[in-house]
Amino acid sequence: MECVALAPASSHFLGTGDYTRFCDYRFLHPARLGVLPVNATKRWDKDANKACRDCEECDYETLPHVINHCKGGGKFRPRQLRHNAIVGRIKKALLPRCELLAENQVVGSDGLKPDLVFRKGRDIFIIDVACPFENRPSALEDARKEKCDKYASLLPFYSSRGYNPVIIPIIVGALGSWDPKNDSFLSKHMSKSYLHKFRHLCVSETPVKWSRDIYVQHITGKKQYEENGQDFEEQQPQGPQTYFEYINSQV
């Protein structure tokens, strides 16, 4: 919750529900409070198997593992689509004002592939998106530093060609925490009203939506989305009336 408190956009939907599905709303609050049912949190059963049910690499099935790290059950693809959804929104917002030079393409001699490279005059913007699990504000800071360190070699690559390059990490937590440091760049290239809406969309329609579907797919084994235009096919529970009854019935 420390990360949620960093920016009002992280909880914009509490009063209005804007851009947020009901199933996401039911998922998000227990997820942020750390009370979603996963194997590692069965404190009432000391003999319970706490290992991940989908992969053999993790001895403790925690929520960060499920939505960000588990390699089982085909969850790499929805995590990739979660990331790409944010990239797509940034690209759409900047195209009217900047020239797109590269999108997920090798740049420089080190084989680096930033998500987006834009040019505006003599300025080069090297943009890369990350969706870390926001257990503490330091997780957002670490993700930002990691991106800056990773693409540092591209600065002299563009500087030697007469440009003014800058690395722009865009950090949005897997549970919808908006990093306010994103605003220092975005506010220069978007109107105030559009940036306000952009934050809300990046919180609700990207990480929150995808993280919920990754979690439910992990617990139930049922794919929660279709890649046709990245639309979603909602899986309606048959019988149980509450979300937690549905989840527990599948365990």
Image (cartoon, rainbow, N blue to C red):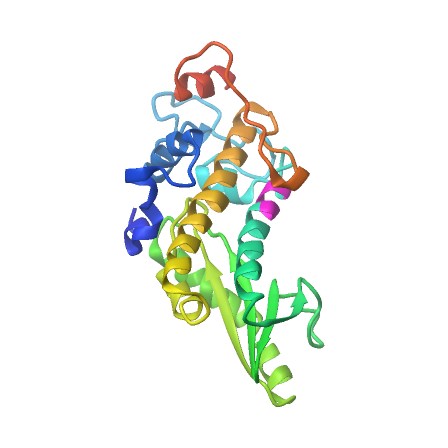
Q: Is residue 235 magenta?
A: no
Q: Nearer the viewer, residue 170 or 76?
A: 170
For residue 117, which quarter of the picture? bottom right
Q: Is residue 3 visible?
A: no
Q: Is residue 213 above or below residue 100?
A: above
- Give the residues drawn in magenta, as a range: 77-81
In the picture provided, is 135 more to the left or to the right than 237? left
In the picture provided, is 251 more to the left or to the right than 117? left
Name which residue lies at 30% across and 46% down: 1
For residue 118, which quarter of the picture? bottom right
Name which residue lies at 56% across and 49% down: 85
Name which residue lies at 62% across and 43% down: 76
Numbered label tally: 0
| Residue 184, x across and y down, in percent | 39, 70
Q: Is residue 155 visible?
A: yes
| Residue 110, x across and y down, in percent | 69, 73
Q: Nearer the viewer, residue 159 or 121?
A: 121
Q: Nearer the viewer, residue 198 or 172?
A: 198
| Residue 34, x across and y down, in percent | 35, 36
Q: Is residue 14 above or below residue 134?
A: above
| Residue 4, x across and y down, in percent | 32, 49
- Does the magenta stretch mainly form a helix, a strand or a loop? helix
Q: Residue furthest top?
A: 239
